[in-house]
């Protein structure tokens, strides 16, 4: 399976600022997925990032708030813009490596606290 | 739409007790099914998976069988250990171009010595 390096692992940010989260994969993958895990809750998909095209956002998430870059097949960034305390969550990137059902690998997560 | 419904927690068991965490799903087509585990302070890890009906996924003493007739993928372990304390997530992935995972709400398991 793939190995994902995600950073930062945690950050405390002031409201109104932005934070960019990076994910580096040790092999080329077509799709990268960005999830949010709010405190005590399950994972919710934010968007799917394909190399060379615009990210596809899920209902309730917009590009202006969560811009995503995917400059190549091994790297992606998610920016949380104009943050408010409601954005305090764990943000995770994920990739699927191999054939269908092979399995997904997750980054270790970025624990964001907005004060 | 597609969804995963998990047994509500938290679940507290004594060491060596039998564990069942229920998971049912709603999906179009034939999804692959997964159990993920999140240990305290750590990231999500794949525990086991099944890709078609009647498949049994197993790992670390945990098992789950893909039951198409009941649309279920219940997680079981015959004898839990304190080290199994974690949050367990059931998830599905549809075939085709939509390759993201849909997660259940998660079940917090605490095993007491």
Image (spheres, grey):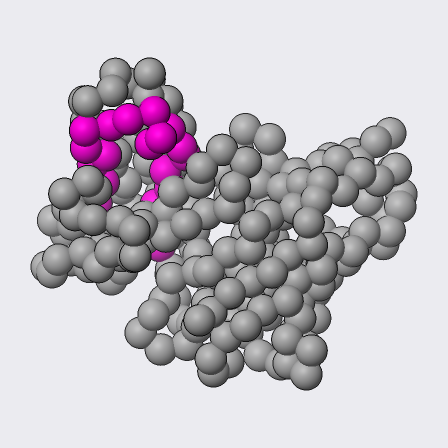
Question: Most prominent secondary structure in the magenta stretch?
Answer: strand
Q: In the picture, residue A13 is in which quadrant?
A: top left
Q: Residue at x 64, y 81 (%)?
A: B68
Q: Is residue B30 magenta?
A: no
**Residue A79 % position (x, y):** 20, 36
Q: Is residue B57 left or right of residue A49?
A: right
Q: Residue at x 44, y 56 (%)?
A: A104
Is B8 situated above or below B98?
A: above
Is B97 situated above or below A40?
A: below
Q: Residue at x 56, y 50 (%)?
A: B105
Q: Is residue B64 left or right of residue A92?
A: right
Q: Is residue A89 magenta?
A: yes
Q: Which residues are magenta?
A: A76-95
**Residue B45 % position (x, y):** 53, 46
Is A73 situated above or below A64?
A: below
Q: Quadrant of the C terminus of chain A?
A: top left
Residue B8 in view (yes/no): yes
Residue B57 in view (yes/no): no
Q: Residue at x 67, y 40 (%)?
A: B108
Q: Is residue A72 left or right of residue A7?
A: left
Number of numbered labels in the structure image: 0
Q: In the picture, residue B12 is in which quadrant?
A: top right
Q: Quadrant of the N terminus of chain A?
A: bottom left
**Residue A62 % position (x, y):** 20, 49
**Residue A76 % position (x, y):** 21, 45
Q: In the picture, residue A7 is in which quadrant?
A: top left
């Amino acid at each position: 399976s793939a190995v994902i390096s995600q950073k930062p692992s945690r950050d405390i940010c002031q409201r109104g600022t932005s934070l960019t989260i990076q994910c580096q994969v040790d092999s080329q993958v077509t799709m990268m997925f960005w999830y949010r895990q709010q405190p005590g809750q399950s994972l919710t998909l934010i968007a799917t990032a394909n190399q060379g095209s615009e990210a596809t956002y899920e209902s309730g998430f917009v590009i202006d708030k969560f811009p995503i870059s995917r400059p190549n097949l091994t790297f992606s960034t998610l920016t949380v813009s104009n943050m408010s305390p409601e954005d305090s969550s764990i943000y995770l990137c994920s990739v699927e490596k191999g054939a269908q059902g092979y399995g997904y690998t997750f980054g270790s997560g970025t624990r964001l606290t907005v004060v | 739409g597609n969804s995963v419904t998990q047994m509500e927690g938290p679940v507290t068991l004594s060491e060596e007790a039998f564990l069942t965490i229920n998971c049912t799903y709603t999906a179009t087509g034939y999804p692959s099914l997964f159990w993920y585990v999140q240990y305290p302070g750590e990231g999500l890890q794949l525990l086991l998976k099944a890709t078609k009906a009647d498949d049994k996924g197993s790992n670390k003493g945990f098992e789950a069988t893909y039951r198409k007739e009941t649309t279920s993928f219940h997680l079981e372990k015959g004898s839990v250990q304190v080290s199994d304390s974690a949050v367990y997530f059931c998830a599905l992935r549809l075939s085709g171009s939509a390759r993201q995972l849909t997660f259940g709400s998660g079940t917090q398991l605490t095993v007491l010595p």
